[in-house]
Amino acid sequence: MFTGLIEEIGKVEFREQKGNILILGIQGEKIITRAKAGDSVCVDGACLTIKALKNKLLYFDLMVETVKVSTLGELKIGSNVNLECALKVEERFGGHFVTGHIDGRGKIIEIIFTGDSKGIRIAVPLDFTDYIVSKGSIAVDGISLTVIKVGSDYFTVSLIPYTIKYTTLGTKKEGDRVNIELDILAKYVAKSNIKKEQKENYLKNLLNENK
C-alpha cells in the first residue's frame, strides 16, 4: 500500500528487454539507502518489486501486463520517474490509499498556468469517469491528487508549487501520457448495491471521513 506522496524523482539508467520481461535499473538516491531486494516500490504509480540493488541502482522486472496498461514501457534511458516506498505500519498516513495497480493511461490535453500553480486536464477512457468524483482522490503517475472537475471523458486537477517542483508532473507537456489509478473506495462503491443516484454523495462522504 502507498500514499501517493512522492519521496523522490528517480532516473532510468538501465533498460533491457529479455523475452517478455522488461528490466529497468532506476537511480533513487533516497530510497536505495533503506530498500532491499524484495521490497515494493511505486514507480510512476506502478507497484514493482525490487529484484536487486547493484551499482547504486534499483532493478525491477516488468511483466507484460504492467507494460501493457502503463506508460512504463515507454521509458527510456534518462527518463524521470516518481518513486515511493511502500507504507510501513508505524508510519503516518497521508494522501490517499494507492495500491500501485494501474487501471490504465490518460492523456494530458490541456495545461493552464495560474500564478505559481497550474491546472491539468486529462482525457481518460469513458468508463473511468464512473469512478471519479469532484473533490475525490485520484493517482496520476503515482501522485495523490484531488479532482477539481469531471467531464464525460476527462477530469481536471490543480498542482501546487510543491507538486510541480518535486514530481514529474512539473515537466509534463500537453500530449504526454500518464498512468491512472482510480480511487479504490470509488471502486468499492461502484460494486455495491447503492443506487446510482446515491453513489456520488455516498462516495464524497466516505472520502471526507478518510482524509
Image (tube, rainbow, N blue to C red):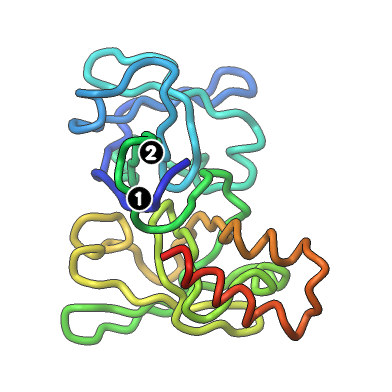
Mark 2: amino acid: Leu
Q: How crowded is mark 2: few (under 14 residues within 10 Å), some or many (20 or more)?
A: some
Q: Mark 1 points at which residue?
A: 93
Left or right, 198 with respect to 67, comes to right
Under mark 1, the amino acid is Phe
Crowding at mark 1 (Cα within 10 Å: few <14, some 14-19, many 20+): some
Q: Where is residue 70 in the image (x, y as percent from the top left)?
A: 56, 47
Q: Is residue 147 above or below residue 183?
A: below
Q: Residue at x 47, y 59 (%)?
A: 139
**Residue 131 rendering spot, x and y as whole percentages:** 65, 69
- Which residue matches tag 2? 87
* Image quarter of residue 27: top left
User: Going 63% across and 65% down the picture, which residue do you hit?
Assistant: 186
Asked if the residue at tag 1 contacts the one at tag 2, i.e. Cβ–Cβ closer than 8 Å, the answer is yes
What mark, if any, has residue 23 been given in the picture? Answer: none
Specify whether 9 is left or right of 68: left
